Image (tube, rainbow, N blue to C red):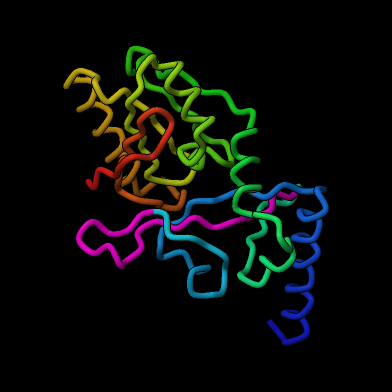
Amino acid sequence: MTPEEKEHYLAEIDQVVQKAVDGEYKLYPVLQPASWPGVKNGALYNVEVTEDNNKDVPLVVESYAVETPDGLVYLGKKHKEFFGNRNLYQEANDNLDGLEQGFKFEKEFDNKVLSSNGTRFSNERVLSYTQMRMAHDFLESEELYVSIPRRGNILIIPKDSDKDLLDMFLYVHRHNWNDKTNDNTHIANILYYIRSGNREGIVYL
């Protein structure tokens, strides 16, 4: 990319972010592995999960992107200035709360596990109190485990499920994590522990 091409590319990103500021497009949080190139290239992000044995080392980060008809455009750190005194983090999470995506009961789990696979912000639903509150209501359980091994994969199970169901849940999680035919980006080999809509802990696998 020539300097002129790079300048034009960056200007286009600025224009997209400005449309989010003006309300034409919406801003969302996007989960990424800590190895995501944006971390080293000036992207705006917060650390979401740290390594189990070293709390100073990120494992999962929460980036921020504008949804456009052509895909996602990620914010750089400089784009915080575009929003002035507005809390862009809150705006992104409010937009996530408002997503109209359905949950699906998985027949292979005797309809005792939820999924929401294949949609753009499947994984990010774990970040939303509102979305997790829906999952609690569907599963009639106030404590959940959530699997998000790769982009586009999410499975949710009641924490108090019987051993056979939990074993099957973990088997599917590990399959999704290890599946070499799946081109979707890895996020993390972990489970979120959700209680009453809130992220209360991490199970490292």
Q: Residue furthest bottom?
A: 3
Task: Tell whether position 202 is magenta.
Answer: no
Residue 113 location, x and y as percent? 37, 21
Question: Height in image: 90 above or below 74?
Answer: above
Q: Which sits in the foreground, 12 or 172?
A: 12
Query: On the picture, is 6 further left or further right than 23?
Result: left
Residue 34 location, x and y as percent? 40, 63
Residue 46 location, x and y as percent? 48, 60
- Residue drawn at 38 percent across, 40 percent down: 199
The residue segment tinted magenta is 49-68
Question: Height in image: 148 above or below 33?
Answer: above
Q: Residue furthest front?
A: 85
Q: Main secondary structure of the magenta part?
A: strand
Query: On the picture, is 141 further left or further right than 46?
Result: left
Query: On the picture, is 14 further left or further right than 179?
Result: right
- Residue drawn at 35 percent across, 59 percent down: 59
Displayed quadrant of residue 82: bottom right
Task: Tell whether position 67 is magenta.
Answer: yes
Displayed quadrant of residue 139: top left
